[in-house]
Image (cartoon, grey):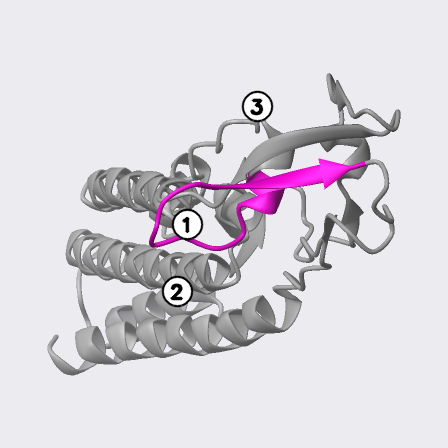
């Protein structure tokens, strides 16, 4: 990556060689630093939003809720709170949980009539993304405030990365209901019977879900780093050509 601090020092040396006074040099470099900081924060926000949408497409609420941007030693990238990018789920047998507090049939088998399907399948996903976008908006404001105070180039993005993390999605209170309601039912909730006579390894098994976001985040980070390099170079070039 292009080193922003190095490029600002190069601008400072260029201005000094051209006869600018120290006060003018400080003002110009401070303006360039602020412009870089805000532009980098905007690039980070756009990258996080792109990653969040990708996470929503595979219904990975955990990925979206952990998303964050990181500003570290002149490097900027998207990651998660845990550092994990693979939120895939293995097959999940549900019969044991579904048959809690069952009724007993005449033949002694256990059974239970349960609701499946839900009209609100996408509500939690939308809420998670909305929380994230609200956090990004607040962080953009914080980054703008940091950028206008003349602090170091990394201050704005650091404020952004520290404050925008998505609000955690509430823990599931009913894991079984969420697992079996995998598709929205236009006719509303329907009912099915689960029975101990059914094969627990073939019936009522939540299929595995691929929620590995590694390649997606890697691609986003590659483009993000190039965008930030372009921002740094273009801002310095702008101030070199207009002073």
Report helix, strand or loop for mark 2: helix
Q: Is residue 73 left or right of residue 153?
A: right
Placement of 17 over or under 60, stated as above or below: below
Placement of 157 over or under 107, stated as above or below: below
Q: Earlier in the sequence, mark 3 or mark 2?
A: 2
Image depth: mark 1 or mark 3 in front: 3
Badge 1 vs badge 3, beta-carbon distance below 8 Å:
no
* Residue 91 spot, x, y in % from top left: 78, 54
Q: Residue at x 87, y 28 (%)?
A: 107
Q: Which residues are magenta?
A: 178-195
| Outermost left residue | 242
Report helix, strand or loop for mark 3: loop
Q: Quadrant of residue 108?
A: top right
The residue that mark 2 highlights is 50
Q: Is residue 130 left or right of residue 57?
A: left
Q: Earlier in the sequence, mark 1 or mark 2?
A: 2
Q: Residues within 10 Å of mark 3 (few under 14, many from 20)?
A: few
CA distance separating discs 1 and 2:
22 Å
* Residue 3 spot, x, y in % from top left: 49, 68
Q: Residue at x 75, y 40 (%)?
A: 94
Placement of 185 over or under 162, stated as above or below: below
Q: Is residue 81 visible?
A: no
Between 68 and 178, which is closer to the camera in this rendering? 178
The residue that mark 3 highlights is 173
Residue 154 shows which numbered tag?
Answer: 1
């Amino acid at each position: 990556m292009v080193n922003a601090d190095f490029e600002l020092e190069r601008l400072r040396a260029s201005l000094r060689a051209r006869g600018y006074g120290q006060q003018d040099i400080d003002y110009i470099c401070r303006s360039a630093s602020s412009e870089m900081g805000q532009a980098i924060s905007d690039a980070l926000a756009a990258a996080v939003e792109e990653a969040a949408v990708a996470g929503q497409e595979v219904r990975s609420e955990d990925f979206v809720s952990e998303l964050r941007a990181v500003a570290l030693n002149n490097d900027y990238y998207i990651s998660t709170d845990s550092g994990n990018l693979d939120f895939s789920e293995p097959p999940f047998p549900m019969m044991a949980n579904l048959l809690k507090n069952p009724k007993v049939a005449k033949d002694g088998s256990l059974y239970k009539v349960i609701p499946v399907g839900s009209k609100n399948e996408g509500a939690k996903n939308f809420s998670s993304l909305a929380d994230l976008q609200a956090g990004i908006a607040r962080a953009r404001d914080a980054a703008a405030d940091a950028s206008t105070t003349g602090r170091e180039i990394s201050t704005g993005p650091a404020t952004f990365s520290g404050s925008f993390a998505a609000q955690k999605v509430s823990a599931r209170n009913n894991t079984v209901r969420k697992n079996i309601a995998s598709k929205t039912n236009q006719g509303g909730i329907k009912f099915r019977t689960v029975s101990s006579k059914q094969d627990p390894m073939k019936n009522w098994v939540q299929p595995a879900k691929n929620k590995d976001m590694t390649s997606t985040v890697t691609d986003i980070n590659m483009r993000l780093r190039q965008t930030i390099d372009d921002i740094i170079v273009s801002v310095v070039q702008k101030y070199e050509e207009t002073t």
